[in-house]
Amino acid sequence: MSAVATPIYDYAPPRRAKPAPFLPTTRAEMAALGWDECDIVLVTGDCYIDHPSFGMALVGRLLEAQGLRVGILSQPEWDSAEPFKALGRPRLFFGVTAGNMDSMINRYTADRKPRSDDAYTPEGAGGRRPDRAVTIYSQRCREAYPGVQIMVGGIEGSLRRIAQYDYWSDKVRQSAIVYAKADILLFGNAERALVEVAHRAAAGEKLREIRDVRGTAFMTPHGWMPARDWAVLDSSTVDTPGRVEPHPDPYAMESEKQEAACSDPAAPQPIRIQSKAERIAARQAERQRTVVRIPAYEAVAYDPVLYAHASRTLHLESNPGNARAMVQQHGERDVWLNPPPIPLTTPEMDYVYGLPYARNPHPSYGKAHIPAWEMIRFSINIMRGCFGGCTFCSITEHEGRIIQSRSEQSILKEIEDIRDKTADFKGHISDLGGPTANMYRLACKDPKIEQSCRRLSCVYPGICENLNTDHSHLIQLYRKARAIPGVKKITIGSGLRYDLAVESPEYIKELVTHHVSGYLKIAPEHTEEGPLSKMMKPGIGSFERFKEMFEYYSKQAGKQQYLIPYFIAAHPGTRDEDMLNLALWLKKNNFKPDQVQAFTPTPMALATTMWHTGRNPLKKLARTSEKVRIVKDAKQRKLHKAFLRYHDPDNWPTLREGLIAMGRADLIGNSPNHLVPPQQPGEKRVAGPRPDSRPGQRPSQPRQPQRPGQGKGKGKQAPGKRRMG
């Protein structure tokens, strides 16, 4: 399996055709294009908006550019197979995704309650996609056309590619490919795999027989191997449970004795010492013929330590430069995961984002309000990926840690296209960003180090000395973008990585002076070391340093601007005292958060592993490994959220009861030093939340009070979804 990839624009298309105004969604639209069938039919849980921020549009236009006829079934009714026949049987395959979000996250709140709205649906209407949409859509495709080939992907398929804990059913579920009975699953940003698989399918290969493409998963008989020279490693030998030891230099000589023997002139047959380049090449060749077997679904479903171990192993095998194939048994079959895809180069990114998008919703929606579209219609994605590694976030698991950036020319051209081709553009570009606003063109200083690295984060517990934190490319991009005629204002809407920003005061000055529209979103997530260490987030000192610089440059620019900090309640590792200290910090700094969220376990995230197993996968695991405090009790979760909105009178009864249970009644009163006022006449009392102790137990005596500020540690957001990093 080669680590050298063919550029996605170098494949010879089977036919060339003029791009369609919109990819067809009905037989009538197919007829207008002169088509009698589609090569590929894409099924999505989102409405069809022909814009590169929406996965199906990007995938559809990319396949169209390969000379394939592509149709889209957008939000089909799923109670029967008939809607899935609307475009006929595809010549090659159905491509199925839940949409831009996992369907369960899209449909349910952190408290498992159904949402009444859906940002990816006209008029924000809820209920337009099924639970576990990848599975349901795939089943309906096969009912419509028995024997049809099915490819699944998108973020739902990507995050559920192995056995994963599912918060909404509170159990470990099998890989999505098992439930969907699909022929192949694509994970990550899958343009490279998609193009290769599509061309091979067009040449006559069956999807189920394509087993050598990076970024793909498939089912095999148990014990299947690609060839006899492949080696199988048990995951316990790759990451042996036990003490955490420093990683040895993988390129060092085995011993001084061996080195001496190699250099001894008296030795009868001296051994030639391999060069470093030769040793690297040999190791890479060996890794490409190695598969790591992680514990089976039947094991991880009932053993928390094995689940946490499998999760840790998966994340350690995530660098495309050194990741090995992985396999996990499911019953009598195996789910085989090839190594992650090779990231796109800058020319490839330019190619993908330069395709002929209509940049509008499909005309069938008329003038319907589509919340996600309204949010991003004047924003531009300049990069993808995130090396932050925040344990609660799914961006790294899906897009990878290596930043993939577009060129300046590509970005500036898209701004000009918005200006020239959008009738209601008023001169305001609402974002130049991505998963993180300020990781544009940041990368490891040495590609060889990057290829061999197995760190889960480039910025935790501190910024890696090998990471380039130079923001000059982004500063230059900002200056050129706002100099474009017709552009009156450019603001940054994506979440900012403040621990990187403080490394470049010039960037903060540029941002604050020209690109903040009164408020800037930022995500410290917490103030206390306990939860921050489980989030893999920097201490609050980094945020306070950024806040000081933000206020200084705002004053220098003569502007009154404010930070909007985001915090997470009930994250693994959080105590009641941690939330109390956070509330006191918020009050001291006069922050009154409006939108707050409780931790939601998302598929495959490391924090979800903590939530499910009660163990810390950031460290090597054993039966006696570190236990993590988990906040699952509904009343305690409510208390933690109430601490974030200490200023809301609706939360005061909950906070009073909680403070009394914690032995901190001294914080109830009417002075500025108190957190909440005393009970008001006629105010309704609430049932007291359970103070945290050992899970499920009430302490036998009151907990000792903790002083305000005690236990303090050291000191982003994509359009349409909560993204913090």
Image (cartoon, rainbow, N blue to C red):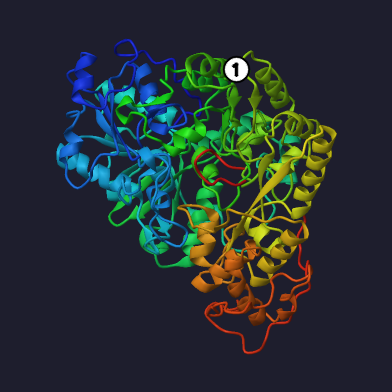
Residue 705: image location, x then y, percent: 74, 79
Question: Which SS class for mark 1?
Answer: helix
Name the quadrant containing residue 472.
top right
Give the residue number, with chain letter if any, for mark 1. Answer: 412
Give the answer, above or below, for where 51 lies relative to 695.
Answer: above
Residue 318: image location, x then y, percent: 53, 43
Name the quadrant containing residue 638.
bottom right
Name the quadrant containing residue 532.
bottom right
Q: Identify which residue is drawn at 45% across, 38% down.
A: 371
Residue 109: image location, x then y, percent: 44, 57
Viewed as shown, does residue 339 lie left or right of 73? right
Viewed as shown, does residue 367 lie left or right of 504? left
Give the answer, above or below, for where 156 lies relative to 37.
Answer: below
Specify whether residue 213 is in view.
Answer: no
Q: Identify which residue is drawn at 57% across, 79% down.
A: 682
Front residue of 233/566: it is 566
Quarter of the rendering occupied by the N terminus: top left
